[in-house]
Image: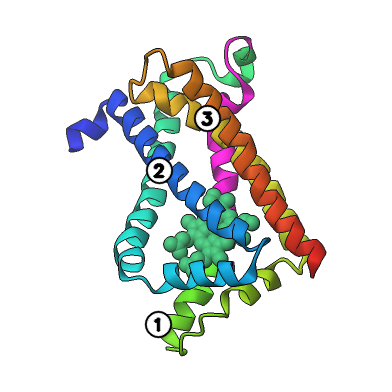
Amino acid sequence: MGGLIKSSIARKVAMALSGLFLVFFLLQHFTINFTSIISADVFNELSHFMGTNFVVQFLLQPVLIFGVVFHFIMGFILEIRNRNARDVSYARYDGGANSSWMSRNMIITGLVVLAFLGLHFYDFWVPEIVHKYIEFAPEDATRYYGELVEKFESPIRTGLYVISFVFLGLHLWHGFASSFQSVGFNNKYSVAATKFAKAFAIVIPLGFVVIALVHYFNH
Ligand code: HEM
């Protein structure tokens, strides 16, 4: 395993696989959160299921946390290795000639998403852990919708969320599409897969923006 992680190809593949896993998470997270702007009851039901189901809580959630931590640690390692391998820094070299801004700044867009996750965990995850495992508060299956909408009363928090979703889109624009190449997906469906990835990078972050703004303007 140590040897594998040391090879640069293995590192790219690991980065791509963990990224693809996070894309799946993002899709389900988006779907559940999107219901919050359609029906409070459906959102409460889905959230109650996710928040109390044993498999979700004690199997999928730890895997997800591991996936997030793994992806950002590997991202840092890749960035440092690439910087060391490059003898001319991008500041002095016209990288724009053969690569996009998004591909050259994955570490920046990734760091913004990481900072967002810090705020997001403070907003939702920490209160959830306190509710369940510190206060041992009785489960109320109708509490989730109220807890969500109150977060979007603040214009500052809503603004920070919206800016973060734009950076998430920039990160996905390059990351999702290039993950196919990194895992060796190279066949007649490659062009369609790239188009799908770019569409995903626009639609999902934009959808998150819509959720945040709808709750903000509805309160
Ligand atoms: C308007 C947009 C969003 C809303 C309303 C939202 C809402 C929530 C809520 C309610 C939870 C708590 C779940 C729980 O009870 O454990 C949560 C957890 C989480 N969210 Fe979001 N989220 C949004 C966007 C995002 C985005 C863009 C990402 C990733 C870049 C993200 C990543 C996470 C993660 C990793 C968790 C912890 C998952 C877990 O508890 O298992 N969220 N979010």
Query: Disc 1 residue type?
Result: Tyr
Residue 2 part of the magenta segment: no
Q: Secondary structure at mark 1?
A: helix
Question: Of tags 1 and 3, which is closer to the observer?
Answer: 3
Q: Which residues are magenta?
A: 97-123
Picture residue at 57% right of the left edge, 67% below the top: 43
Q: Earlier in the sequence, mark 2 or mark 1?
A: 2
Disc 1 CB within 8 Å of nearest ligand 1 atom = no
Picture coordinates of residue 59 (x, y %)?
29, 62
**Mark 3: few, some, or many residues within 10 Å (few <14, many ≥20)?**
many
For residue 8, what is the image quadrant? top left
Which residue is more in the foreground, 80 or 219? 219
Q: CA distance from mark 1 to mark 3?
A: 38 Å
Q: CA distance from mark 2 to mark 1?
A: 27 Å
Decide: is 101 above or below 206: above
Q: Secondary structure at mark 2?
A: helix
* Residue linked to disc 2: 71
* Residue linked to disc 3: 197
Disc 3 CB within 8 Å of nearest ligand 1 atom = no
Q: How is the image coloured?
A: rainbow
Instruction: Report if residue 115 is visible in the image.
Output: no
Q: Earlier in the sequence, mark 1 or mark 3?
A: 1
Picture residue at 77% right of the left edge, 61% below the top: 156
* Residue linked to disc 1: 133
